[in-house]
Amino acid sequence: LRLSYGTAGFRANGSLLKSTVFRVGVLAALRSLKTRAAIGLMITASHNPALDNGVKIADPHGGMMTQEWEPFADELANADSPDSVVQ
């Protein structure tokens, strides 16, 4: 499975997103350091089927994370090992 960050964040079967949620948390922390502001992290599932879940980041103004950071999100989510996440 190759995840790609989009307007809905990362979406997939919830059982496949365990490490992704942690990694998005790391990205949110880095984004907070960069912007010097609070960053939101949202688990999405509202009207979707029970197994269809997602996670996304909200920037300080409350909107979607800026597109310039999507490649970083993709790289973290798809890293093949914990060492790759750190790098």
Image (tube, rainbow, N blue to C red):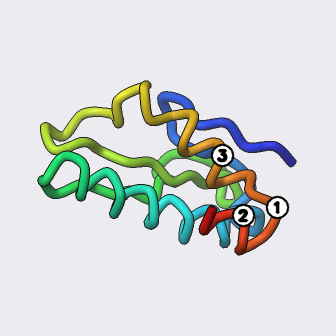
| Amino acid at the residue labelled 3 | Glu
Q: Which mark is residue 84?
A: 2
Around disc 2, counting alpha carbons within 10 Å, would you say few (fewer than 14), some (14 to 19), or many (20 or more)? few
Q: Earlier in the sequence, mark 1 or mark 3?
A: 3
Front position among marks 1 and 2? 2
Q: CA distance from mark 1 to mark 2?
A: 6 Å
Q: CA distance from mark 3 to mark 2?
A: 9 Å
| Amino acid at the residue labelled 1 | Asp
Around disc 3, counting alpha carbons within 10 Å, would you say few (fewer than 14), some (14 to 19), or many (20 or more)? some
| Amino acid at the residue labelled 2 | Ser
Residue 42: where, in percent of width, then height? Answer: 38, 56
The residue under the point 61% across, 54% down is 53
Front position among marks 3 and 2? 2
Q: Tell me the residue that label 1 is attached to.
A: 80
Tag 3's secondary structure? helix
Q: Tell me the residue that label 3 is attached to.
A: 75
Q: Earlier in the sequence, mark 3 or mark 2?
A: 3
Tag 2's secondary structure? helix
Residue 30: where, in percent of width, then height? Answer: 35, 58
Q: CA distance from mark 1 to mark 3?
A: 10 Å
Discs 1, 2 touching: Cβ within 8 Å: yes
Q: In the image, is 61 to the left or to the right of 30?
A: left
Discs 3, 2 touching: Cβ within 8 Å: no
Around disc 1, counting alpha carbons within 10 Å, would you say few (fewer than 14), some (14 to 19), or many (20 or more)? few
Tag 1's secondary structure? loop
Q: In the image, is 24 to the left or to the right of 58?
A: right
The residue under the point 35% across, 36% down is 65
Q: In the image, is 86 to the left or to the right of 37?
A: right
The image shows residue 6, relative to residue 85, as above or below, that is: above
Residue 78: where, in percent of width, then height? Answer: 74, 51
Residue 86: where, in percent of width, then height? Answer: 60, 68
